[in-house]
Image (cartoon, grey):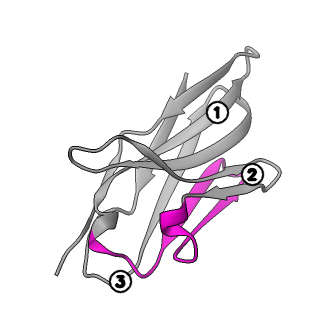
Amino acid sequence: QVQLVESGGGLVQPGGSLRLSCAASGSILSIYTMGWYRQAPGKQRELVAAITSGGSINYADSVKGRFTISRDNAQNTVYLQMNSLKPEDTAVYSCNARVITRSLRVSDYWGQGTQVTVSS
């Protein structure tokens, strides 16, 4: 089994910053892609940013230039630095990892989600 534990959400004023962290643990041989998704009330879940083990990065157009994803492969941890936050960034942010387990199975795992609220 693989577990993803997120931290770092909260309430912040517009223009402020937050840093999310997601640590993966368990029966992990390797992690291919780690990423962050978000879901706002009444909307579909969307990709925010993703990073491969080789460092290739993909951002949603709405966060380019404001958010930065990074990864510590040794610690199986992914980070999302969010700057210049806007009210429309308010959502539940969830971590995702595509994991190759020690039993050589490839599966997607999700964290429990962390609330980010941008409001004055």
Numbered circle sitting on residue 74 = 2
Out of 39 and 18, give the one closest to the viewer.
39
Query: Is 76 in the magenta?
Result: yes
Residue 85 position within the rendered picture, expressed as x and y whole percent measured from the top left? 37, 76
Q: Earlier in the sequence, mark 2 or mark 1?
A: 2
Q: Is residue 26 magenta?
A: no
The amino acid sitting under disc 1 is: Arg
Dot 1 crowding, Cα within 10 Å, few <14, some 14–19, many 20+: some
Q: What residue is rendered at 43% in x and 39% in y? A: 111
Residue where numbered disc 1 is placed:
98
In this rendering, position of residue 13 left or right of residue 106: left
Q: Quadrant of residue 27?
A: top right
The image's mark for residue 16 is 3
Report the amino acid beneath label 3. Gly
The residue under the point 30% across, 66% down is 88
Nearer the observer, 60 or 36: 60
From the top left corner, tell me how far across and down residue 30 is, in percent.
Answer: 76, 34
- Say whether marks 3 and 2 touch (CB < 8 Å): no
* Alpha-carbon span between mark 3 and mark 2: 30 Å
Vertical placement of 2 versus 92: above or below? above
How far is mark 3 from mark 1, CA to CA?
Answer: 30 Å
Q: Quadrant of the N terminus?
A: top right
Q: Nearer the viewer, mark 2 or mark 1?
A: 1
Quarter where residue 86 is shown? bottom left
Please, what secondary structure does the residue beneath circle 3 have?
A: loop
Q: Which residues are magenta?
A: 61-87
Name the residue nearer the viewer: 18 or 23.
18
Tell me the amino acid under the disc marked 2: Ala
Query: How far separated are the C-alphas under marks 2 and 1?
Result: 16 Å
Q: Position of residue 20 (x, y in %)?
A: 46, 62
